[in-house]
Amino acid sequence: MPPPPLPKQSGASAAAASLLQLRRRGQPAPPPLLLNLQELERFENLLVFAKAVVEGYYAGKHKSPYRGSAAEFADYKEYAPGDDLARLDWRVYGRTKRLYLRQFEEETDMTVYLMLDTSGSMRYAGEKRQSKFFLAAKIAAALAYLMMSQSDKAALVLFAQKVTQFLAPGGTRRHLHRMVTELERVRPALTTGIAGAVQECTALFKKRGRIVILSDFLDDTDALFDSLAQFVHRKYEILLLQVIDPDELNLPAFSAAKFVDLETAETVQVDPEEIRASYQANIKQHIDALAREADLRQIQHRLIDTERPYLDAIEAYLGFRGKNERSR
């Protein structure tokens, strides 16, 4: 299903409806900073931001982010180079003179593929808000930190109409730094093509695991699920995190506005009040269809709340992770 078009009376194409940039005449676009000035004062860089968000979330829940700290003991595993030395059981060593690690019921050694949409539509930012891309990039950094703190391995896929960058799965702090560095380099551009990018990942994803896609998903829904079908068949667990600006849900409150397609530069002049009800119905239909089709395929979907995007994404991922672990 294609993204929702503006009503016919607006004269806009479907593309101009779904991937729009609202600009006041003469108002320059904000500089492409990953963190705004207030956040720069609080956080040294994106990695520190991710650490603060994740550990702050767990502090609020009174629970450690590190797997096994409060889990039920299950078994022992013989030590291998590279294992976490903090997990060694020294009492067993004292008895056997051999190194063993304590394992807990929650341990899985899962590989997670983080896919981030870097197409032009992700540049959209409502007034006094960050762009969808920078929200999504910060969510990706927080999730990568969370995954590695839980001893999972994380991979990073950046894509527009095709894959533009791929970092193979890793679980070290150096790998986390590489992921964050790539996220900070990105400047969204090019046209959307989620289905094609997912298709390319068939050759990239060597080990079965979880796929987390961060995007506005303003693209062809049928093509997306066709491309995901191969991963569903191969028993991958899939989570779609949809990042939408409030303007894209409701249209901004201006008497007249010029909408600019961020991917094609197509423009249309329109009074938002004349089309608001029809537009809201169309965008809701598109989001509901995405959620419904995902549910039919046992793919999880979450529309991210832009008022609390990082915590919303963490809770969505933890719920997704816990549900799939219980089902295995």
Image: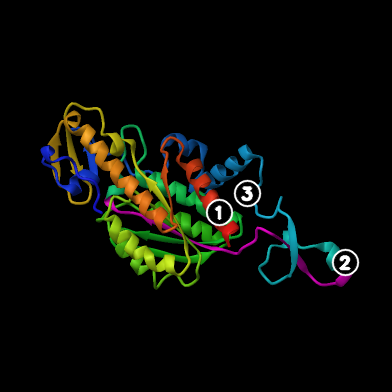
Type of colouring: rainbow
Question: Image quarter for residue 303?
Answer: top left
Q: Nearer the viewer, mark 3 or mark 2?
A: 3
Which secondary structure lies at badge 1?
Answer: helix
Which secondary structure lies at badge 3?
Answer: loop
Residue 141 point in image, percent of width and height: 48, 51
Give, as a three-letter code, the residue at label 2: Gly
Relative to 170, residue 121 above or below: above
Quarter that holds the N terminus = bottom left
Relative to 122, residue 193 above or below: below
Question: On the rendered structure, is 274 left or right of 143?
Answer: left
Q: Nearer the viewer, mark 3 or mark 1?
A: 1
> How dense is the environment of label 1, judged by Cα within 10 Å: few (below 14), some, or many (20 and up)?
few
Asked whether 115 falls inside the magenta stretch, the response is: yes
Q: Earlier in the sequence, mark 3 or mark 2?
A: 3
> How dense is the environment of label 3, judged by Cα within 10 Å: few (below 14), some, or many (20 and up)?
many
> Does residue 163 show up?
no
Q: Are marks 3 and 1 in contact (CB under 8 Å)?
A: no
Which mark is on residue 94? Answer: 2
Q: Which residue is mark 1?
A: 323
- Residue at 29% x, 53% y is 119
Q: Which residue is mark 3?
A: 65
Q: CA distance from mark 3 to mark 2?
A: 29 Å
Give, as a three-letter code, the residue at label 1: Lys
Span highlighted in magenta in the image: 95-120
Asked whether 131 falls inside the magenta stretch, the response is: no
Q: Are marks 3 and 2 in contact (CB under 8 Å)?
A: no
> Does residue 93 show up?
yes
- Residue at 55% x, 61% y is 174
Residue 145 point in image, percent of width and height: 54, 52
Q: Earlier in the sequence, mark 3 or mark 1?
A: 3
